[in-house]
Image (spheres, rainbow, N blue to C red):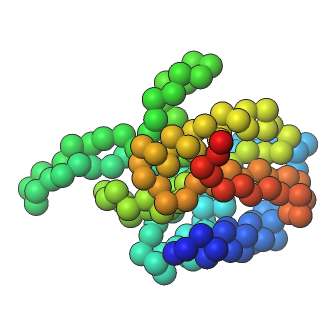
Amino acid sequence: MNKKQVLSTIQKSLKILYAKDSLLMNSAYDINERKITHRLAMYLEPFFKKEGYVVDVEYNRIRGDYDSDAVGNLMGKKLEWHDQGSSFVYPDIIVHKRDTNDNLLLIEVKMAWKNSKRQNDFLRINEYLKEFDYKYGIYLELSEIYDECQMVSGPFT
């Protein structure tokens, strides 16, 4: 998939999210970001499944080389990150082929009313792109209103 197709797919999925789950986007409810990323991933998956990809939320594993009778060496699809006590971080949503290095897309999601760490997310996206060879990295800032959402594509400077 090219970048235009990926961005279009995210937009379509966001429209579905806001149509079906707008209650979750209310800042007064202060719903956990993981719940929202889970719902968004559900709406992304049918589009990417057609291309042979799966959509995972906070996925942290990849197996190394292995033969038919072994489970392989588990390696983390995560970054070591020492910001405010966090030791490892995972992308909010990834689109990939499991147990391979075919990493199409990572999405970092923030709620507009909780976006004080935006620059940290930009840095993380850059690291994911570099370390795990994701083709595309997206910062997605969700608001209470669909038209106020922001989608920015990395790498970031």
Quadrant for residue 6, please give it: bottom right
From the viewer's side, name the closer residue of 2 and 45: 2
The x and y percentages for residue 115 are 79, 38
As drawn, 127 above or below 20 = above
The x and y percentages for residue 20 are 78, 69
- Seen at 53% across and 22% down, the residue is 82
Quadrant for residue 117, please give it: top right
Quadrant (top left/top right/bottom left/bottom right) for the C terminus: top right
Q: Is residue 118 visible?
A: yes
The x and y percentages for residue 2 are 55, 74
Q: Is residue 71 visible?
A: no
- Seen at 34% across and 57% down, the residue is 101
Q: Residue furthest front?
A: 157
As drawn, 53 above or below 87 = below
From the viewer's side, name the closer residue of 27 and 91: 91
- Seen at 41% across and 48% down, the residue is 132
Q: Residue furthest top?
A: 85
As drawn, 64 above or below 54 = above
As drawn, 142 above or below 118 = below
Q: Is residue 115 left or right of residue 108?
A: right
From the viewer's side, name the closer residue of 80 and 67: 80
- How many numbered discs sit on the rendered protein? 0
- Seen at 31% across and 59% down, the residue is 100
Q: Residue furthest bottom?
A: 50
From the viewer's side, name the closer residue of 108 and 128: 128
The x and y percentages for residue 151 are 74, 57
